[in-house]
Image (cartoon, rainbow, N blue to C red):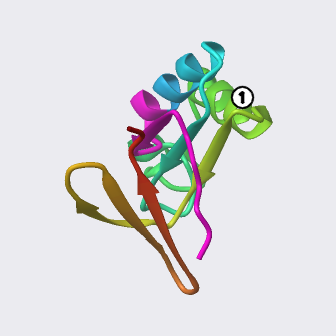
Amino acid sequence: MNTLRCDILILGAGPAGMAAALSAAACDKQVIILDDNPAPGGQIWRAGPQATQPALARRYRDAIAASAAIRLVNGARLIARPPRTVCCLKPPTAVVWFTGRN
């Protein structure tokens, strides 16, 4: 089993999640974004392939892809185990546990 460590765990790669990840990375934090969709963007991309991607959202997506401080995990399902543990199920082969720091 792989253990991933981060300073900040963000649930959701929509516009707010992407903005939060970029802000945290700018403050020298290691960030993991978990999202259940196959690609980042949340509601932005749901209009289909003919939709025009807003320029800001496109910049967010490109900046996240280029950042060494941000790891994006798409297609994830979560199981929370309070107080500080999250299990990420990434079909078809991975189970990843995230634990809070003491």
**Quarter residue 85 falls in:** bottom left
Residue 15, percent across and down? 45, 31
Farthest residue to the front: give it.
Answer: 102
Residue 51, percent across and down? 55, 44
Instruction: Give whichever of 19, 6 is nearer the camera.
Output: 6
Residue 87, percent across and down? 38, 66
| Residue at the (57%, 29%) spot, across then down | 57
Residue 52, visible in the rendered structure: no
Quadrant location, the N terminus: bottom right
Residue 84, visible in the rendered structure: yes
Residue range (magenta): 1-17
- Quick check: 57 left or right of 46? right
Magenta run includes residue 53: no
**Quarter residue 52 falls in:** top right
Instruction: Give whichever of 6, 24 is nearer the camera.
Output: 6
| Residue at the (23%, 62%) spot, across then down | 81
Q: Amino acid at mark 1?
A: Ala
| Residue at the (51%, 45%) spot, across then down | 33
